[in-house]
Image (spheres, rainbow, N blue to C red):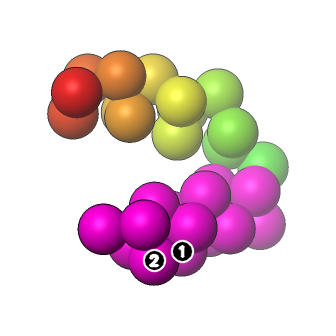
Amino acid sequence: WAALKALSLGKSLSTGNSKSFFVRQTKTK
């Protein structure tokens, strides 16, 4: 799932929603 995380992180960074990604990651956890 590391690849998926990296992809999601890159996508979030591209969109400029690192915060949203972080929140989503915590929610998924």
Residue drawn 52% across the image and 40% down it: 21
Residue tagged 2: 3
Q: How many marks?
A: 2
Q: Nearer the viewer, residue 28 or 20?
A: 28
Give the amino acid at mark 1.
Leu
Q: Is residue 15 visible?
A: no
- The residue at the far front in this view is 2
Crowdedness near tag 2: few (<14), some (14–19) or many (≥20) residues, C-alpha within 10 Å? few
Q: Quadrant of the N terminus?
A: bottom left
Residue tagged 1: 7
Q: Is residue 24 visible?
A: yes
Residue drawn 43% across the image and 66% down it: 2
Magenta residues span: 1-14
Residue drawn 75% across the image and 56% down it: 13
> Which structural element holds mark 2?
helix
Side (left or right) of 21 relative to 2? right
- Which image quadrant is residue 11 in? bottom right
Give the amino acid at mark 2.
Ala
| Residue 11 is one of the magenta-drawn residues | yes
- Which image quadrant is residue 10 in? bottom right
1 or 2: mark nearer the eye: 2
> Marks 2 and 1: in contact by CB < 8 Å?
yes
Q: Position of residue 8 (x, y in %)?
A: 50, 64
> Which structural element holds mark 1?
helix
In this rendering, the answer to whether 15 lies above or below 19 is below
In this rendering, the answer to whether 26 lies above or below 21 is above
Q: Position of residue 17 (x, y in %)?
A: 67, 42
- Which image quadrant is residue 18 in? top right
Side (left or right) of 29 relative to 16? left
